[in-house]
């Protein structure tokens, strides 16, 4: 069986801070980490784990966004 998953693939940037930032407040982060995420990626991982699909492919568009 072939599977084609068309969905989002994101890079999540996580900042650990001591508390939720209040308006006008500046905080320093304890750490910064990057993780792969997005619904499309999560669906691909779930498909691979559920059925062991060796012939799964993903299609994505690369977009450079500063937001």
Image (cartoon, rainbow, N blue to C red):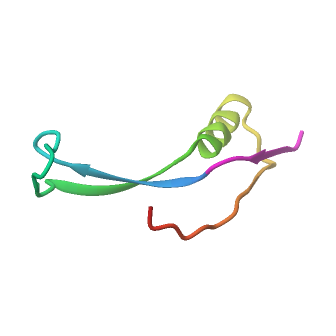
Q: Residue at x 65, y 44 (%)?
A: 40
- Looking at the image, the residue that sits furthest to the right is 1
Look at the image and give the residue range highlighted in magenta: 1-8
Q: Position of residue 30 (x, y in %)?
A: 13, 53
**Residue 32 picture quarter:** bottom left
Q: Please state which of residues 42 and 25 is positioned toward the viewer in this rendering.
A: 25
Q: Position of residue 64 (x, y in %)?
A: 55, 70
Image quadrant holding the C terminus, namely bottom left
Q: Please state which of residues 30 and 1 is positioned toward the viewer in this rendering.
A: 30
Q: Residue at x 10, y 43 (%)?
A: 18
Q: Residue at x 56, y 45 (%)?
A: 38
Q: Position of residue 66 (x, y in %)?
A: 45, 67
Judge from the rendering whether residue 16 lies leftward or rightward of residue 52; answer left or right.
Answer: left
Q: Residue at x 11, y 56 (%)?
A: 26
Judge from the rendering whether residue 32 lies leftward or rightward of residue 7; answer left or right.
Answer: left
Query: Up-down: is 53 above or below 63?
Result: above
């Amino acid at each position: 069986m072939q599977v084609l998953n068309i969905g989002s693939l994101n890079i999540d940037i996580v900042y650990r801070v001591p508390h939720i930032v209040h308006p006008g407040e500046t905080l320093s982060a304890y750490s910064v980490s990057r993780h792969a995420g997005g619904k499309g990626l999560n669906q691909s991982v779930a498909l691979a784990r559920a059925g062991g699909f060796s012939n799964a492919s993903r299609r994505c568009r690369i977009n450079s966004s500063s937001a």
